[in-house]
Image (cartoon, coloured by chain):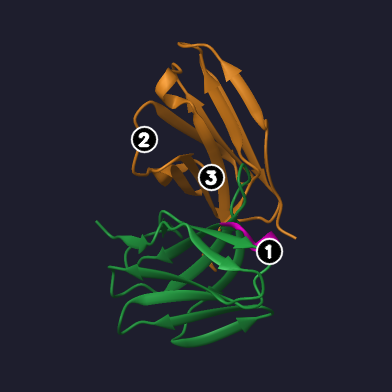
Amino acid sequence: DVKVTQSSRYLVKRTGEKVFLECVQDMDHENMFWYRQDPGLGLRLIYFSYDVKMKEKGDIPEGYSVSREKKERFSLILESASTNQTSMYLCASSSYTDTQYFGPGTRLTVL
Amino acid sequence: QKEVEQNSGPLSVPEGAIASLNCTYSDRGSQSFFWYRQYSGKSPELIMFIYSNGDKEDGRFTAQLNKASQYVSLLIRDSQPSDSATYLCAVRNAGGTSYGKLTFGQGTILTVHP
């Protein structure tokens, strides 16, 4: 079974803090993705990575950065958290079959 | 902008009925199509994928793909209250170095009432 784990299920941070969200997959997948999901807006792609140290911007990269130092780990970084970054953050991974498998999600609240 | 459209619903069906969920996509060259189920507060989980025109069955679920008309549908037979969830359609766009990117629809909320 594919397993994608995320470092926290719930996270509360203050405005201006630097926030790290970690994602780990155990299936040797090449591709990894970070989405945010908000009511009425669906899933929106923030960043994705197709190999170690490789990254591409998604549809809404502003205010975020990512890091992929190892194949199994993909980190999302909020450089200076703002209240409009309160959301559900979902990590996914996929191989050549394109099927994306999601982690359990992190519900981030920025106060 | 490549788009995937779904009726947001809610779609309400009685227990035991067939639920029919539809999705249209704009990129004619799309190759791979996926249906995910998402319970409230949870992450999406894969139900089915389909690559070829026609029907693909898996238990109570049938995915139907018509590339000429650019639509993909999901039928749920003998619907159960536990099927109540949001169903997301996702499409792999054609060409280029997409690296497995999928475009997701907004999702259809399904409610199965006893």
Q: Which mark is residue A61?
A: 2
Find residue B114 and name its label: 1
The residue singled out by tag 3 in the image is: A52
Front-most of B79 and A70? B79
- Same subunit: marks 1 and 3: no
What is the count of numbered marks? 3
B83 in the magenta segment: yes
Q: Dots 2 and 1: beta carbons under 8 Å?
A: no
Q: Give the vertical position of A100 relative to A25 (above or below).
A: below
Q: Give neighbour class at mark 3: few <14, some 14-19, many 20+ (Cα, 10 Å).
A: some
Q: Amino acid at mark 3?
A: Val
Q: Secondary structure at mark 3?
A: loop
The image's mark for residue B66 is none
Residue B4 is a magenta residue: no
Secondary structure at badge 1 equals loop
Compared to A33, does A95 lie above or below?
Answer: below
Amino acid identity at mark 2: Pro
Which percent across, then down, holds residue B17?
A: 61, 76
| CA distance for labels 1 and 3 | 49 Å
Chain A colour is: orange
The residue at 62%/23% (across/down) is A11
Residue A84 quadrant: top left
Work out how far the residue at label 2 is from the one at label 1, CA to CA, in angstroms. Answer: 43 Å
- Chain corresponding to green in the figure: B
